[in-house]
Image: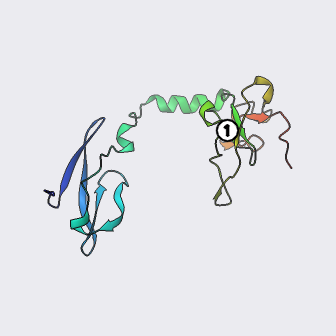
Amino acid sequence: MDRPSLGRIAQYGRRGPMSLEKKEVFPNLFRYVCDSCPFDWPRTPVKESDLPPPPAHSCPSENRPEPTPVLEEQEKGTSESPRPRPVAVCTRCGAVSYALSLINGQCGQTVAGKRCIGVNGSAPSADDWKRCAECEGTGSIGTTRCGPCDGAGWLYARNRGRR
């Protein structure tokens, strides 16, 4: 099996070639690393003779849209306009979610350094939510995040059924 020599190995993502570099991370132990993101593979460095062929790799940062000057205008508008109504709420910590696909999935919040063990409960109805009176639905008061709604702009109106 013909192995490439030390150096760059081109991989092709959506936006063109991504280069992975074979790197000696410890004496006689190697892995592939990307020079434009924190990707490294395999996680445990191996001898050069045991190093498999490089994986297909596309940098997450390469697939993001380019920032536009409109961002400043969007940020200004965010503080004045109300936030969208959430569709799910965590059964444990009360964090809100805006994606229907996250309903019945595990909450993604970190509480006291650990991932929350709650589940995103369904709350898509308009009756499930009331607009926060403190921030008037914007999620912020002046330049600070609103405390009662934790920046969501909405308060869960149904009984959360805590035990």
Place of residue 40 in the rendered image (x, y in percent of width and height, measured from the top left): 35, 57
The residue lying toward the viewer, choosing from 79 and 125, is 125
Residue at the extreme bottom:
27
Task: Tell me the quarter of the image containing the N terminus.
Answer: bottom left
Q: From the viewer's perspective, is 137 left or right of 64? A: right
| Residue 129, above or below 51 | above
Q: How many marks?
A: 1
Q: Is 124 placed above or below 12 here?
A: above
- Where is mark 1, residue-wise? 104
- Residue 17's spot in the image, x, y percent? 23, 41
Q: Residue at x 78, y 42 (%)?
A: 148
Quick check: 153 above or below 106? Answer: above
Q: Secondary structure at mark 1?
A: loop
Picture quadrant where residue 69 is located: top left
Residue 99 found in image quarter: top right
Position of residue 82 measured from the top left corner of the image (x, y, whole percent): 68, 27
Foreground: 6 or 50? 50
Is 42 left, or right, of 138 in this rendering? left
Residue 111 percent location from the top left of the image? 68, 56
